[in-house]
Amino acid sequence: MSNPQPIQRVVVHPIVLLSVVDHYHRLGGSKRTVGVLLGSYRGHGILDVCNSFAVPFEEDSKDPSIWFLDHDYLESMYQMFKKVTAKEKIVGWYHTGPKLRSNDIQINTLINKYCYTQNSALVIIEAQPTGFGLPTDAYVAVEEVHDDGSPSCLAFSHVASEMGAEEAEEVGVEHLLRDIKDTSVGTLSQVISSQLLALKGLEESLRTIRSYLEKVVAQERPVNCAILNNLQDIFNLLPNLSVEELAKALTVQTNDQMLVLYLGSLVRSVIALHNLLDNKLKVRAVDAQA
């Protein structure tokens, strides 16, 4: 079976991230790890990556052209996976990057021989993410034709990636997060921390957009109509904050939220003082009886 349309979006499931992080830390976390992605082609250019397994891989740190990937291990592991989940096929491979390497095209060509789709997908998963946003970047190999008449070659083209999960996976992730959650930190501080991280991610995205537009204006990059259309849609969806009714509504909602937080802090302080006085009275009564 082969996908009739080229891959346009890759959906990565949570179990894949957990498996890759476990693989990375089991090997010490000092070098990049490589594995195979399993999944299925959903249609409409969407590739579902729902499982993975690690593959023994070695490479020379000084010479990237020298590398080794265990074919026999890959084939035997895939045969065992087929006995458990026959619907999951080899759709690509992953490595922990954090960036593309010069030998990735050669590895991709090898993995493509075992892939049931027309073109295997490469997903770079950062086991130790340093920035904001998703820790995944997806690529597919495309043939690059040169204008000077030189022979064509393969090059990676970036495709969209996102996180997706079924209902059972969402329940499992919630239980996992509940186990690793810091109980000493309040819910309010967790919400504020999440909002802060989201705002930082938004700021980084805005900086990327600004940098791209500046390069387009300076004619350092060609004009991409698809990107400009998406940016225009984003700007059209932004609310008009100059409308008095909207500004008043936002102000009223913010004041209501701050009032609830203020009242909650007062109640919390009163209860803490009450418990302190109650404890002192109990201690005094115990001392009087002694």
Image: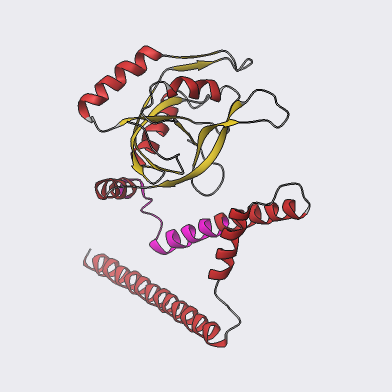
Query: Percent position (x, y) of residue 181?
Result: 36, 50
User: The N terminus is located in which quarter?
Assistant: top left
| Front position in the image: 21 or 42 | 42
Query: Percent position (x, y) of residue 201?
Result: 55, 54
From what the image shows, is residue 162 above or below residue 203?
above
Residue at 27 percent across and 65 percent down: it is 287
Considering every residue shown, the one lying at the far front of the view is 149
On the picture, is 72 further left or further right than 6?
left
Residue at 76 percent across and 55 percent down: it is 217
Q: Quadrant of residue 51?
A: top left
From what the image shows, is residue 205 above or below residue 82?
below
Q: Quadrant of residue 69?
A: top left
From what the image shows, is residue 36 above or below residue 168?
above
Q: Is residue 116 magenta?
A: no
User: The C terminus is located in which quarter?
Assistant: bottom left
Considering every residue shown, the one lying at the far right of the view is 218
Query: Percent position (x, y) of residue 246?
Result: 52, 83
Residue at 54 percent across and 32 percent down: it is 142
| Front position in the image: 168 or 285 | 168
Residue at 56 percent across and 42 percent down: it is 130
Query: Percent position (x, y) of residue 212?
Result: 68, 52
Which stretch did the figure color magenta?
178-200
Q: Specify the principal SS of the magenta part.
A: helix
Q: Is residue 197 magenta?
A: yes
| Front position in the image: 148 or 27 | 148
Q: How many marks?
A: 0
| Front position in the image: 54 or 265 | 54
Coloring basis for residues: secondary structure
